[in-house]
Image: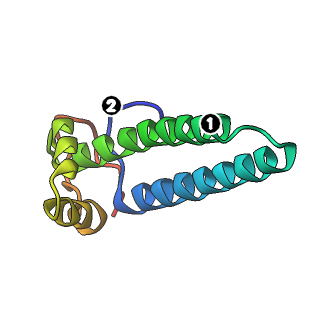
Amino acid sequence: MLTMNGRIGRARYFLTILGLTIVMYIISFAVGIIGGSNGASDEGIGATAYLISIVFTVVMAFSVVRRFHDLDRPGTHYWLLLIPLYNIYVSLVLLFQKGTLADNKYGPNTVTS
């Protein structure tokens, strides 16, 4: 999970992103509840939630790069997700397009079918 090498299939990619998103929101929510009940400063709570979101975004980026590798595309295509509206298309490609069936330069096929 914490590597940009190799490939990741559609189902595993979806479950990884979904799981990380849910965990990130649960932790951020808990930080807000705990910080609010302790009377902590808003700056400290905001900084903690911001740090949590950065860590989870980096971990998600690893999965995105591995998914691009499954499609036989370089990981630098990750930056296409920063282009407004086009990022929707790229996200849908990552979710729905089948990876290359044969081994590619990024590793062996992850799906056995």
Please give the name of the residue rendered at 58% of the width and 35% of the height, measured from the top-left corner. Answer: 47
Q: Is residue 74 left or right of residue 16?
A: left
* x, y percent for residue 89: 17, 66
Q: Nearer the viewer, residue 60 or 82?
A: 82
Please give the name of the residue rendered at 72% of the width and 46% of the height, measured from the top-left corner. Answer: 31
Relative to 50, residue 30 above or below: below
Give the structural element (helix, strand or loop) at label 2: loop
* x, y percent for residue 36: 78, 49
Q: Is residue 3 left or right of residue 69?
A: right
Which quadrant, please, contains the C terminus?
bottom left
The answer to which image quadrant residue 97 occupies is bottom left
Please give the name of the residue rendered at 35% of the width and 61% of the height, measured from the top-left corner. Answer: 10
Sequence-first disc among 2 and 1 = 2
Relative to 22, residue 109 above or below: above
What colour scheme has been applied to the protein in the rendered image? rainbow
Q: Which residue is mark 2?
A: 5
- Residue type at numbered disc 2: Asn
Give the structural element (helix, strand or loop) at label 1: helix
* x, y percent for residue 59: 46, 38
**Number of residues whose C-alpha sits closer than 10 Å to that of mark 1, classed few (under 14), some (14–19) or many (20 or more):** few
Q: Nearer the viewer, residue 39 or 7?
A: 39
Q: Nearer the viewer, residue 63 or 80?
A: 80
In three-dimensional space, the C-alpha distance between marks 2 and 1, rounded to whole angstroms, equals 37 Å
Q: Are marks 2 and 1 in contact (CB under 8 Å)?
A: no
**Number of residues whose C-alpha sits closer than 10 Å to that of mark 2, classed few (under 14), some (14–19) or many (20 or more):** some
Q: Which residue is mark 1?
A: 43
Relative to 92, residue 77 above or below: above
